């Protein structure tokens, strides 16, 4: 796994990075990630030694995820991205272990319904959770998916399409007729329809509909990452890449001819190619 800051325009998977901004963004995120990892390792040491842990590093997994997405967008090898994402899963497991042994006991927080949140509950950084599920499926790591599922359930946020996506590998209860949360979240209905479709033709039709509205749908729900490529500034964080790994996971698991999906900038086509190559190697 690399900690080197490098950039090759020809390998940029979306071609939207400004080199100076990317290098500053990547360098700063690596520094912060490694700082938080050091702190989390101390938390792990204390936990393993039976000491009281009053800190839960729940922000760390999504920080590692952000670094992994920056690496993927910038054109780093998928093996590097996979190794980085494995780190995010490992620290998600640590967060769950700390929460299980030392759950929140502040009466005020309990009254307010506070829960330990690792992947943002699908609300703050909405694509993080969907993409975390999608990456677990593309990497064929059911054990990783189980960890993300536990974090998702603990947070209490429910999205029927996410439940259906997880259910493709791990059984999970969901009502395919349930209404989506208000605020524009029904843009994910075609994703749910694609998962539930019985034929490949129907699946492709719904995935195309989902991807054609994916960017604007994320804008409507207030995803703060949307349009960040337009105002890249080395002084500020922003664009890390726009990806719909959940769409790629459905295409991969249903073994679709995804030619029509490859027109969308945020469909990670080479991730699907990589997953298929890995599957062939192990057959």
Image (cartoon, rainbow, N blue to C red):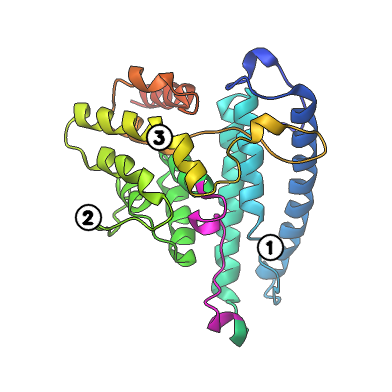
Foreground: disc 1 or disc 3 = 3
Q: Which mark is residue 238?
A: none
Q: Element at badge 1?
A: helix
Residue at the farthest right position? 235
Q: Secondary structure at mark 2?
A: loop
Q: Is residue 280 magenta?
A: no
Q: Residue furthest left?
A: 198
Instruction: Please report the residue visible at 60 percent of the width from the left and 78 percent of the height from the top.
Output: 104
- The verdict on residue 112 being magenta is yes
Return the residue found at the far top.
10
- Looking at the picture, how far across and down is residue 59, in whole percent? 65, 57
Q: Which residue is mark 1?
A: 44
Tell me which label, 1 or 3, sits earlier in the chain: 1
Quadrant of image for the C terminus: top left
Q: Is residue 76 above or below residue 158?
A: above
Question: Which element carries disc 3, helix, strand or loop?
Answer: loop
- Quadrant including the N terminus: top right
**Front disc: 3 or 2:** 3
Counting from the top left corner in percent of width and height, residue 194 is at 27, 37
Q: Whole-Å distance between the Cαs marked 1 and 2?
A: 42 Å
> Badge 3 local density, few (<14 within 10 Å), some, or many (20+)?
some
Q: Which mark is residue 177?
A: 2
> For mark 2, does the 10 Å Cα neighbourhood hold few (<14), some (14 to 19), or many (20 or more) residues?
few
- The answer to whether residue 52 is left or right of residue 269 is right
The residue at 21%/28% (across/down) is 200
Q: Residues within 10 Å of mark 1 (few under 14, many from 20)?
A: many
The front one of 261 and 101 is: 261
First of labels 1, 2 by sequence position:
1
- Looking at the rendering, the stretch of residues picked out in magenta corresponds to 109-126
């Amino acid at each position: 796994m690399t900690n080197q800051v490098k950039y090759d325009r020809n390998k940029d998977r979306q071609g939207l990075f400004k080199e100076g901004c990317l290098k500053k963004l990547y360098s700063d995120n690596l520094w912060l990630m490694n700082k938080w990892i050091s702190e989390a390792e101390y938390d792990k040491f204390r936990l393993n030694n039976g000491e009281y842990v009053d800190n839960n590093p729940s922000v760390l997994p999504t920080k590692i995820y952000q670094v992994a997405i920056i690496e993927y967008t910038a054109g780093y090898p998928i093996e590097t991205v996979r190794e980085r994402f494995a780190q995010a899963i490992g620290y998600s497991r640590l967060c769950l272990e700390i929460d299980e042994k030392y759950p929140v006991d502040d009466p005020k927080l309990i009254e307010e319904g506070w829960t330990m949140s690792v992947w943002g509950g699908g609300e703050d950084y909405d694509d993080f959770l969907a993409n975390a599920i999608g990456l677990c499926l593309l990497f064929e790591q059911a054990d990783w998916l189980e960890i993300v599922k536990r974090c998702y359930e603990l947070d209490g946020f429910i999205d029927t399409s996410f439940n259906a996506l997880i259910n493709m590998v791990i059984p999970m209860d969901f009502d395919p007729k349930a209404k989506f949360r208000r605020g524009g979240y029904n843009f994910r209905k075609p994703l749910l329809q694609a998962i539930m479709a019985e034929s490949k033709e129907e699946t492709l039709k719904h995935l195309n509909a989902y991807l054609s509205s994916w960017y604007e749908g994320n804008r409507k729900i207030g995803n703060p990452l949307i349009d960040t490529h337009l105002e890249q500034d080395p002084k500020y964080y922003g664009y890390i890449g726009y990806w719909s790994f959940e769409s790629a996971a459905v295409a991969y698991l249903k073994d679709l001819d995804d030619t029509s999906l490859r027109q969308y900038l945020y469909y990670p086509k080479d991730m699907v190619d990589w997953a298929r190559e890995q599957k062939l190697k192990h057959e």
